[in-house]
Amino acid sequence: MNPMSRFRPSLKSLSIIAALLTASVAGSVSLARMATMRLATTSPGNDTQKFIGASYFPNVALTNQDGVTRHFFDDMVAGKVVLINFVYTTCKLSCPLETARLRKVYDLLKDRMGKDIYFYSISIDPDNDTPEVLKSYRQRFKIGEGWDFLTGDEESVTLLQKKLGLFVDQLNPASKDSKEGHSLNLIVGNQATGQWIKRSHLENAQILATILQQLHPRQAQPLDLASYSKAPVKLTAVSPGEKLFYSRCADCHTIGQGDSIGPDLKDVSKKRDGAWLRRWINEPDVMLHEKDPVATELLTRFNGINMPNLKLDDGAIEQIIQFIDSESSSAAQTR
């Protein structure tokens, strides 16, 4: 299936915007210091590409989901275009959403993954996230070659977070839930050129995939984006519910196109009690902790991937439900 086929016509113009924005990013990657940081060795006269960043990045040992030891600089970063983020498998907030979003980027770049583009998700919870746990988590999202989940000792992982600019000093490190405040940003870069860019975990998948391609000197066949000739004269208005759905829900759900990482949401208002549905969107973690029977059944049916708590207020929840209802009606009329 074309990865973009799920988008509504009113949002297809995003692919045009993605192309325009990423073209701008590509042109500014080497010019705008606010968007990049160039890391170079401090050794005098050492200007070969393979040593760029060698004295900056720690070459700490990490272990991937298969139990294989990988050294950060030598094995993971040197000579590669990479995307790096930090997660933990018991996260009930944004980690599942972030992984689902990156899975879309992964699918867009699938022909290059594990060849010249690599993803690394590093756990910040080494006590719980053993290689076996990481392997199971990776399998739930049906991730293949080129994307490793890794663990290491806490000191090494914290050092990497700081060096990559992704460390958040917890207000209460002794709190059991302090990890929930970890940085949700990610970083993409090319060690050989010294170009590194921090991006949001909510970045548009097309934009992020295009940036990764443009960071590499070898330009592969372009992504399947809409042609400029098909750009609308005027962008169709997008409702608040639609914006929320495509930024918070669409990575795991469709409306009328079948189950994905999570269930198809077509006619969900007719299938679920209204109060239950609103509470489920509002506090899924609490309902799972309470062992709500429907919530527990959904968790089992969808490979143990928990519904994240998106911290939405009542107004946002109503807007999402209204959009799903509207789309469900449209899908029924076009059958």
Image: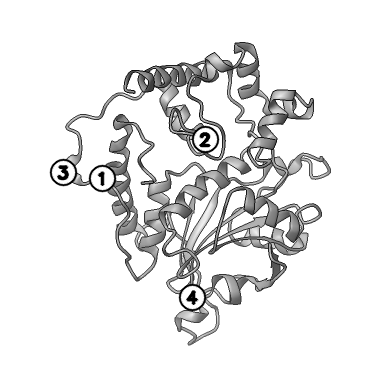
- Residue matched to label 1: 226
Residue at x-position 43% and y-position 65%: 112
Residue 133 location (% of width, % of height): 74, 54
Q: Is residue 55 visible?
A: no
Using the image, determine if residue 263 lies above or below residue 280.
Answer: below
The alpha-carbon separation of the residues under discs 1 and 2 comes to: 25 Å
The alpha-carbon separation of the residues under discs 4 and 3 comes to: 37 Å
Residue 256 location (% of width, % of height): 44, 28
The alpha-carbon separation of the residues under discs 1 and 4 comes to: 32 Å
- How many badges with numbers are in the image? 4
The alpha-carbon separation of the residues under discs 3 and 1 comes to: 8 Å
Does residue 222 appear to the left or right of 97 in the view shown?
Answer: left
Q: Which mark is residue 259?
A: 2
Mark 4 against mark 3, which lies toward the viewer?
A: 3
Residue at x-position 63% and y-position 38%: 302
For the residue labelled by badge 1, is the local secondary structure a helix, a strand or a loop?
loop
Does residue 170 appear to the left or right of 164 in the view shown?
Answer: right
Mark 4 against mark 2, which lies toward the viewer?
A: 2
Instruction: Determine contact: label 3, label 2, CB under 8 Å.
Output: no
- Identify the amino acid type marked 2: Asp
Q: Which mark is residue 229?
A: 3
The mark that comes first in sequence, 1 or 2, is 1
Q: Residues within 10 Å of mark 4 (few under 14, many from 20)?
A: some
User: What colour scheme does the image use?
Assistant: one colour
- Residue matched to label 4: 79
